[in-house]
Amino acid sequence: MSWVHPFAGLLPDAKVLRDIIAPPYDVVDVAQARALAKDLPNNFLHITRSEIDLADDMSPDDISVYQLAAMKYQAMQQQGLLQRDNKIGFYIYELSSGTHRQVGIMAAVSLLAYQQGGVRKHELTRPNKEQDRARHIEALHAQVSPVLLCYKPDIILASLLAGITSHHSHLQAKTPDGILHRLWRMNDTATCNVIAARFGEMRRIYIADGHHRCAAALQVAMQHGDLQLPLAHNYCLAGLFPADELQILAYHRVVHSLAGMSDETFLMRLEEAFFIEPLASANLPKKPREFTLCLPTGVFRLRYRKDIYHADPSYELDVSILDTSVLKAIIGIQDSRHDERLDFVGGQNALATVDKGVSSGQWRAGFLLYPTAINQLIAIADKEQIMPLKSTWFEPKLADGLVCYPFIASNGAI
């Protein structure tokens, strides 16, 4: 099966690239999106989070939100700020910050492969979030927010990408978060055939980030006919990266209540499952099965006492240990998806955010975790199992608006 296909993308004008590309729509709330896009009228947040340009009391799923997004998307094309390539091809995408560098391929990925399990998922999705992005795709007649996929390292692809990225990039911009984004066009037919063939020989590729975007794309495709036909709707915009280059940060937990327990009582309960050691200050855990607990009265290292041997690899995740041994067993949070006592904090600044939030009384307690490993994600996906909610935070994030996938062919073909 051919997993990936080249396409004719819609790219920003290089002169205004930095002002156009934006963080993914789902990592910023409305207030953050407004602040980021305030003085940037052509920033892609005006398209992916167009409610920022409407009244505060406007529902984010009101039809006017999607209509405004489509109007802005069309206007940017008419103004020449977004320009369509005249050849189909792949796009080589490098993200770098400090010592971290990852290089991948932007492509149109088969939704039939996703439906049949060749593109593996590891996360449940929410119908309302799926519906939101499906309506957004339909309004724009395009996909503008890529899914992050990963594949097991391939020596031929690695050599090919190294050769391409040794040349000057077609687009380049550093975003305010310090991430350098570089993009190369690759429309040489022979090279594109090699890329497609390499992915065609892989048994599986994996969703790292973007389950709702992928599910929404499938929802749209199902409304437009047979998934086996080469129609533009039958593919999903994605960036495919070798698994060993991805950087996973931990997704930490904070709670608003300890079920009425004092700090002393809570620590006594924790001793049933953890060795506890006081710390002078908050820090991130250095290895698996260690946690940093932030309380108003102090900071503690928790080391899990027990060995775990389970046929389900998701049970061995640190997020599962915390969920089972602390959130459920001691605090009484049985449903992590819906219990309002629980929140999640990710990203590079998570340590300071959790520490400050607990000290200020915003949260009753915070739990800092060690990151999930990419091989754990792959093992769980291979078993067709689901990881606990918010088990991974991938960073750097793929930019929205760097490459768009328009459904523009008159017959709908890719």
Image (tube, helix red, strand yellow):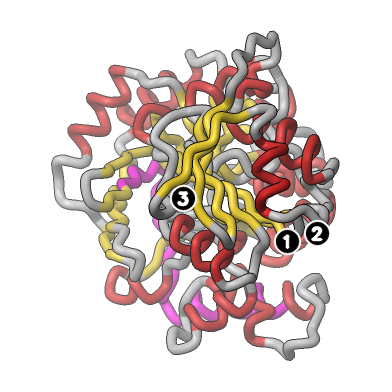
Residue 90 inside the magenta-drawn segment: yes
* Residue underneath mark 3: 8
The picture places residue 222, in percent across and down from the top left corner, at 81, 41
Tell me the CA gap for discs 1 and 3: 48 Å
Q: Which of 378 and 198 is in front in this view?
A: 378
**Amino acid type, label 1:** His
The picture places residue 257, in percent across and down from the top left corner, at 76, 58
Q: Is mark 1 on a helix, strand or loop?
A: loop
Question: In this picture, which residue range is highlighted in magenta?
Answer: 67-94
Mark drawn on residue 256: 1
Viewed as shown, does residue 95 lie left or right of 371?
left
**Amino acid type, label 2:** Glu
Residue ID at (47%, 44%): 278
Residue ID at (78%, 45%): 331
The picture places residue 14, in percent across and down from the top left corner, at 29, 69
**Neighbour tally class for label 2: few under 14, some 14-19, many 20 plus, Cα within 10 Å:** few
Visible residue check, residue 238: no
